Image (spheres, rainbow, N blue to C red):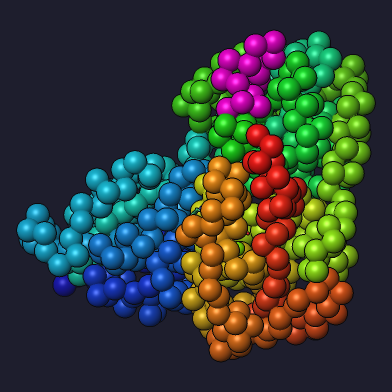
Amino acid sequence: MTANMRSGGRILVDTLVAQGCDRIFTVPGESFLAVLDALHDTPAIDLIVCRQEGGVAYMAEADGKLTGRPGIAFVTRGPGATNASIGVHAAFQDSTPMILFVGDVARGDRDREGFQEVDFAAMFRPIAKWAARIDDAARIPEYVARAYATAMAGRPGPVVLALPEDMLRDEVEAVDRARVAPPVQTPDPMAVATLVDLLKNACAPIAIVGGAGWDAAASHHFAEFAERVGLPVACAFRRQDAIPSASPVYAGNLGYGPNPKLVQRIREADLLLVVGPRLGEATTDGYTLVTPDHPEQTLVHVHPDPNELNRVYKTCLPICADVRELAELLSTWEDEVLSFSSGAQAHAEWLQWSEPQPSGAKLDLGLCVAALREKLPADTIVCNGAGNFSGWFHRYWRYGPFPTQLAPTNGSMGYGVPAGVAAALRHPGRSVLVPAGDGDFLMNGQELATAVGAGADMLVLVIDNGSYGTIRMHQERDYPARVSGTDLANPDFAALARAYGAWAETVETTEAFAPALDRALGERGVRLLHLKTDIEQISNATTITRLRDRARRD
Ligand SMILES: Cc1ncc(C[n+]2csc(CCOP(=O)(O)OP(=O)(O)O)c2C)c(N)n1
Ligand SMILES: [Mg+2]
């Protein structure tokens, strides 16, 4: 053996270090022992061992959202990869850079449907940007560099690489690759000049922002520009940190249950400046708020991926560019003519809409969010999965500077706890808040063990209405008073959290919430407040009684 010979596992870990990877999320498998062995001697990489591959993949996805570079996950063959697929789907729909490495059967056993064998390239093709297998250990640096490049380029997304276990044990010579940077995508100044001209001629423009490639710099520069010209800025679904809520032109969020005044403003807009979002189904209320042909509206779409321009929406001015570069160029654009008063009006409307009014409920979630607003720092990272419980946070929480929101735009349950772990590890000094539904929490509640084991500092709120409430809401609309398949018999969540080693209390009234929150904030590590709410408060906008009354009238 010459001095340059390395195992496939060693080459892979060296390659990841060269790409800047400092953390891997995993559930181990015997299919990638050579990688685990190489990690044994690699202090540069923090290995986070999880309890289920759904948790692994969500953590990697959330880490990708936080850093802008691919979050890294390692899972085993069929069972591990199928569990992890939920996070790949989230990364795909959320445009998040991520790489999932999957241990695979030995090359010589392929196509016998050996133990846990799956054709991973075929399985992941519809939900990954690229899915492939590395058959030659000498080509690991090339495959991994391409995986990084692909995950970050254009519209970011997930890449899946299968690793035959015997390939990882091969001893070969390989040429390392240097860290991959995303491509430079400076906007064409002529196109930006046209954009500014369109703004000058517009009576009622509005920006819709967030999404692919959005980062702290994009947020800073875009807010600077929008504030200077008074342009109202709405955020796409679950991109509420695209600019801080405190910005004087922040107009609120789109998605489920947006401010009707914001909806009206978008309908009446003559110019839509869309920077980053795909204008997906949730953001556009099922392609109705902005219709694909949007007659009488001019649509400027800025996106780093040419395939997203004119894909669904007729686009008057498509600009293929890095959103950060576009925002920076706009912030330094010298033009005194632009000045709108609508940004301040839209912000005032949002302030009013996002102020919780007492609902009369015994444990009033709106008032709980108001208490959280008072006691938690502005740069708190709020992590949630799917369910109506999230609606109170989307509506009433004030999101701080990017990144402060980790929430799946693909509406995937079980995301909050794993995302909270990723956030607590990436930003140990920051406050991390995980609002979770009772259904949502138990989809990945096992990752509390990972959180406690990793010394994560985070506050979990389990909002326990004894129901898959969102589905109950749809049920009450379509089949009133016929509850089927949505009631939940729940554990004592506080006792459960304590069993994991967390600090926990149960809260049953609004008055008890703030003192319990104070006690939670006085502790460190994982803390959980079990909030027992009434299913009657089915969303932040309506009640079961009102839904039934309406169904009776219709
Ligand atoms: C992984 C996954 N499974 C199922 C669904 C469908 N779904 C959306 S919301 C929801 C219920 C959420 O219940 P809970 O977390 O208790 O929140 P609540 O609506 O009661 O506030 C379900 C089952 C989903 N979005 N994701
Ligand atoms: Mg529930």
Q: Position of residue 74 (x, y in %)?
A: 37, 65
Magenta stretch, residue numbers: 287-300
Give yes or no for residue 299 being in the magenta stretch: yes
Q: Quadrant of the N terminus?
A: bottom left
Residue 6 horizontal side relative to residue 470, left or right: left
Q: Nearer the viewer, residue 476 or 457?
A: 476
Q: Position of residue 226 (x, y in %)?
A: 82, 32
Q: Residue at x 62, y 13 (%)?
A: 316
Q: Quadrant of ligand 1?
A: bottom right
Give yes or no for residue 393 being in the magenta stretch: no
Residue 294 horizontal side relative to residue 113, left or right: right
Q: Above or below — where is 207 with respect to 122?
A: above
Q: Position of residue 153 (x, y in %)?
A: 48, 39
Please, what is the dominant secondary structure of the magenta stretch? loop
Q: Above or below — where is 214 with respect to 302?
A: below
Snapshot quadrant of residue 17: bottom left
Snapshot quadrant of residue 254: top right
Q: Residue at x 53, y 73 (%)?
A: 489
Q: Quadrant of the C terminus?
A: top right
Q: Is residue 38 visible?
A: no
Q: Is residue 144 visible?
A: yes
Residue 463 horizontal side relative to residue 19, left or right: right
